[in-house]
Structures are given as structure tokens and as C-alpha cells.
Image: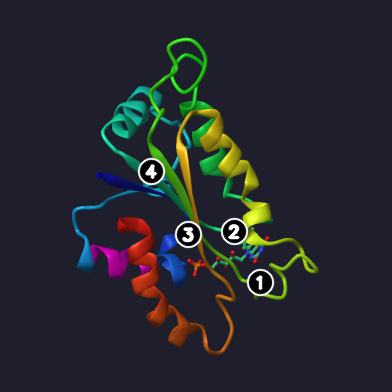
Amino acid sequence: MKTIIILAHPNIAQSYVNKSWIEALKKTNPEIEVHDLYKKYPNWQIDVPAEQALLIEYDRIIFQYPFQWYNMPPLLKKWIDDVFLQGWAYGQGGENLIGKEIGVIISTAGISDVYAESGFGTTEQLLKPMASTAKFVGAKYIGHHAFLGAYTPDAGERLTKDAETYTDFVTK
Ligand SMILES: Cc1cc2nc3c(=O)[nH]c(=O)nc-3n(C[C@H](O)[C@H](O)[C@H](O)COP(=O)(O)O)c2cc1C
């Protein structure tokens, strides 16, 4: 199983959660490719053939990002729009993602009360477009991992404990 993380953080240098996750993963699983979209494409001009060729090499594709307005950061949305083309990702000849695994990892500022049915919706509900996208291209959606409440006083302690769950989600 070859895994790639498509990382979409607009400001990874200032990141707390996503940076910690990637640093932990690099120590335990240096073989996992981390493809940092905001670093690779500062001018947002995506090299579509290169991205498509990259994806073909991997069995599991994980999108990792901080939640922004209950959604993905805009460069990732553009990347999906540009890369998941008809004739490549779906439609006639569009069989390149069939059978691959797709998963999502998000961090949020909102705490668990926010991500409840009685709040703004569960993370599973809010990530439904990702599950549907995976289904549409014939991939298997493996679910998501979320770290909520990035700025609560106990976030540091929770994040340390979360490293193993995060790594397990990526690798198992
Ligand atoms: C433009 C913008 C929009 C955001 N929207 C949300 C949101 O809808 N829900 C939420 O819980 N946090 C939101 N946040 C907070 C980020 O999700 C949070 O800062 C991030 O997940 C923390 O991870 P990091 O330490 O890796 O940056 C937003 C942040 C920014 C900059």
C-alpha cells in the first residue's frame, strides 16, 4: 500500500496542528509522501499532467487540511477541479482512480459542541462532498480523522496523544 498525503495548508509555517502531524509522521513513516500544494504551487498554476502522473503511483490518497468555512482551503478545491478531469477521473477513459482509497484529515478551531448535529453539523456530515467525490471517481472512501479545538488550553496535550491515532489513520 503506497500512500500520499495531499497537504493543503495556506500557512504551514504558522501551523500548530498540521505541522505537528507531519513532523510526527516524518519520524515514524518517512516513506509516506507528503505533497504540499501551497508550497508546490505558490502561483496556483497547477501542473495537471504531473499531478495525475503522481496520483497513479499511489494506492491511498489522503487529503489533509485545516477546515476553512466548513470546507477545504481554496487551492485544494482548485486542484481537485483541475486534476479530476473527465476522461481521466471519470467518464470514458476516466478510470485512473478506480479502486484507490481516499481519506481526509482535518483540523478545526471549533470544539466538539460545534461539530455536533445540534451545532453546525458533524464532521462526517460536513465532509460528505469528499465522500461523494471519492465515490464518483470509483475510489473507496476510508473516512476521516479530525482534531477539533486546535486552540483549547488542553490542545497540546491532546495533540501529543493524537499523533498515534493520526499515524494509524494514514498507515493502517
Ligand atoms: C479563513 C479561515 C477560515 C476558518 N474556518 C473555520 C471553520 O469553518 N471552522 C473551524 O472550526 N475553524 C476554522 N478556521 C480555523 C482553522 O481551521 C484552524 O486555525 C486550523 O485548523 C488549526 O490548524 P493549524 O494549527 O494546522 O493551522 C478557519 C481559519 C481560517 C484562517
Work out whether mark 3 precedes mark 2 in sequence or the reverse, and give the earlier one. 3
Work out whether mark 4 precedes mark 3 in sequence or the reverse, and give the earlier one. 3
Q: Mark 3 = which residue?
A: 11
Magenta range is: 20-26
What's the distance in space between the residues labelled 3 and 2, CA to CA?
Answer: 13 Å
Q: Identify the disc placed on residue 110.
A: 1
Residue at 63 percent of width and 60 percent of height: 123
| Rendering quarter of residue 24 | bottom left
Closer-to-camera residue (38/5): 5
Instruction: Report if the CB atoms under discs 1 and 2 are less than 8 Å apart.
Output: yes
| Horizontal arrangement in the rendering, residue 51 relative to residue 138 (left or right) | left
Residue 83 x/y as whole percent: 46, 28
Q: Is residue 20 visible?
A: no
Amino acid type of the residue tagged 2 in the rendering? Phe
What's the distance in space between the residues labelled 4 and 2, CA to CA?
Answer: 18 Å
Q: Residues within 10 Å of mark 2 (few under 14, many from 20)?
A: some
Instruction: Report if the CB atoms under discs 1 and 4 are less than 8 Å apart.
Output: no
Amino acid type of the residue tagged 1 in the rendering? Gly
- The kind of secondary structure element at disc 1 is loop
Work out whether mark 4 precedes mark 2 in sequence or the reverse, and give the earlier one. 4
Q: Mark 4 = which residue?
A: 61
| Horizontal arrangement in the rendering, residue 155 relative to residue 25 (left or right) | right
**Label 3 CB-ligand 1 distance < 8 A:** yes
Magenta segment includes 50:
no
Q: Mark 2 = which residue?
A: 67
| Horizontal arrangement in the rendering, residue 27 relative to residue 72 (left or right) | left
Q: Residues within 10 Å of mark 1 (few under 14, many from 20)?
A: some
